[in-house]
Every structure is written in structure tokens, then in C-alpha cells.
Image (cartoon, grey):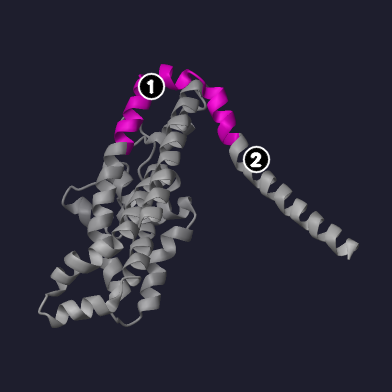
């Protein structure tokens, strides 16, 4: 009996120690960043590199989010509510960007939309260039982040009671009215969470962007790319931008947790 009690205490202590180790493993690098950056965040915030990268990141992620919602919300609704052939295969295709290595994502976008790409060739004929431009950033962000929005929004829509939608339909409501008046209000927390997470993923995008859009300062250089470039020139600038991104990330996590709890 005493042996079992000691064994139980040991297991509890072991689990607690592993929990502490896990917490420290994640938190120590983040704390180290804030200690290292110090006042550099305030001092470097007026740096032209930081300002340009910040503006490009905010502008591109906002446009990307609008496109993601316009394309992703109908897709999430269809996957959640409609019976379509090859549904599982379509879902799998839409989720592929979630597991692709970033460099591969950038490469296939370049193959598709680049100068010699399948779609890129056609666009070049009408004098429309996408690769290594601002719009290449947007395309990269939409490609990697939209699956995250669709998956989260779909899960939220699936949780809405179908009987409510059926009742509304029997009362004469059209599908768009049912979606606006019933489905959307009851799944808004998941849709909003998906939008925030998609925006955060767009903001953090690096690999696909550098492959497809390049790393041109003031043109296609987002915050993650600027951090990478600044490390070779001025570490203080890099630390300042990294701190800004960490603060944004923490804020996003807190917002999503609040939405999940309130929803």
C-alpha cells in the first residue's frame, strides 16, 4: 500500500515537472527576446525598414483576409451543409496547404503563376505580372491561410442545429435568409476565430512569400522577411520587429480565447 502511494506521488511529481519543463521551453525564448530587445522596440519603430515592412504586412494581410472570407465562407458552408460527390477528396485538397512545407508552397505558386507558369503565361499575354510583386504576397498568404479559415468556419457551421434551418425553410425563408438570420449568428464565434487565425497565419507567412514574391525592400518585404534580412545588417532592428510580431501574436491568442469562451 505504501509502495503504491509513493508510486502515485512520484508520477504526479513527474507529470508536474514535465509540465514545468514544457512551459519553460516555450516561455524562456520569448522572455529572452523582450530582455534582449529592451528599449530597441521604441527606438527602432521609426526605422524606415520597420515602417515599410509593417505597412506592407498590414496592407497585404487585410486584402488577403477579405479574399479569404469571400472565397472561404461559401466553401465552408457547402462543405458543412451540402451533400456533394467526392466531398472528402475536395476537403483533402483544400487542406493540403496546411501541411505543405512553405518552400514547396512558394515553388508551386511560382510554377502556376510565374512568368512561365500554367496561369502565368496567360496573364503575361495581357501584360499582367504576379510573381515578385505585391500581389504575389497576397496570393501566397491566401494560399496558406485560407484552409485554416475554411476548416474553422466549417466546424462552427456544422455545430448549428439543422432543425432550426429546416424550420425556417418550411416557413418560407430562402437559403440566403436562413444563412444570414440563423446559421451566421449561431456560428459567428467560429467564423470570427477562423478569420483571426487566418490573418495571423498570413502575417507570419515567410517561405511561400520569399519564393514567390521575393524579398524586395519597400515592395515585397513583409515583417518576417525584414527580420530575416535585418539579422545580417542590424540585429537591433531584427529584435525590434520580432518583438512587435510576438506582441501581435499574444494579442491575437488572447482575443481568440476570449471569443471561444464567450461563444
As drawn, the label of residue 103 is: none
Secondary-structure class at tag 1: loop
Residue 260 drawn at (x, y percent): 39, 55
**From where the camera sits, is residue 49 visible?**
yes
The quadrant of the rendering that contains the C terminus is: bottom left
> Which residue is found at the position 27% from the left and 59% from the top?
119
Q: Which residue is mark 1?
A: 45
Quick one: label 2, few (<14), some, or many (20+) residues within 10 Å?
few
Per the rendered image, the range of residues in magenta is 29-57
Left or right: 26 as drawn, with respect to 70: right
Q: Quadrant of residue 249?
A: top left
Q: Looking at the image, is mark 1 or mark 2 nearer the viewer?
A: 2
Determine the residue located farthest toward the left in the rendered image: 172
Query: Of label 1 and label 2, which has the lower sequence position?
Result: 2
Q: Quadrant of residue 60?
A: top left
> Which residue is found at the position 69% from the left and 44% from the top?
21
Q: Which residue is mark 2?
A: 24
Is residue 48 a member of the stretch shown in magenta? yes
Q: CB of mark 1 within 8 Å of CB of mark 2?
A: no
> Which residue is found at the position 52% from the left and 23% from the top?
37
Secondary-structure class at tag 2: helix
Determine the residue located farthest toward the front in the rendered image: 1
Amino acid at each position: 500500500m505504501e509502495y503504491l502511494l509513493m508510486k502515485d506521488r512520484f508520477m504526479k511529481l513527474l507529470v508536474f515537472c514535465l509540465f514545468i519543463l514544457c512551459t519553460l521551453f516555450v516561455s524562456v525564448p520569448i522572455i529572452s527576446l523582450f530582455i534582449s530587445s529592451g528599449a530597441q522596440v521604441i527606438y527602432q519603430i521609426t526605422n524606415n525598414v520597420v515602417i515599410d515592412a509593417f505597412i506592407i504586412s498590414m496592407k497585404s494581410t487585410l486584402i488577403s483576409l477579405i479574399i479569404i472570407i469571400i472565397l472561404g465562407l461559401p466553401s465552408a458552408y457547402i462543405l458543412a451543409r451540402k451533400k456533394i460527390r467526392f466531398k472528402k477528396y475536395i476537403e483533402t485538397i483544400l487542406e493540403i496547404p496546411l501541411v505543405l512545407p512553405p518552400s514547396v508552397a512558394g515553388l508551386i505558386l511560382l510554377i502556376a503563376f510565374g512568368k512561365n507558369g500554367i496561369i502565368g503565361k496567360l496573364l503575361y499575354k495581357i501584360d499582367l505580372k504576379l510573381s515578385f510583386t505585391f500581389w504575389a504576397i497576397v496570393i501566397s498568404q491566401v494560399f496558406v491561410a485560407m484552409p485554416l479559415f475554411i476548416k474553422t468556419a466549417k466546424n462552427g457551421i456544422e455545430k448549428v442545429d439543422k432543425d432550426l434551418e429546416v424550420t425556417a425553410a418550411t416557413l418560407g425563408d430562402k437559403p440566403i435568409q436562413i444563412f444570414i438570420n440563423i446559421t451566421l449568428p449561431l456560428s459567428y464565434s467560429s467564423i470570427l476565430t477562423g478569420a483571426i487565425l487566418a490573418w495571423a497565419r498570413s502575417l507570419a507567412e515567410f517561405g511561400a512569400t520569399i519564393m514567390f514574391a521575393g524579398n524586395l525592400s519597400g515592395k515585397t518585404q513583409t515583417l518576417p522577411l525584414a527580420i530575416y534580412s535585418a539579422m545580417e545588417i542590424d540585429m537591433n532592428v531584427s529584435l525590434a520587429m520580432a518583438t512587435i510580431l510576438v506582441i501581435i501574436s499574444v494579442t491575437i491568442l488572447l482575443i481568440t480565447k476570449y471569443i471561444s469562451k464567450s461563444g
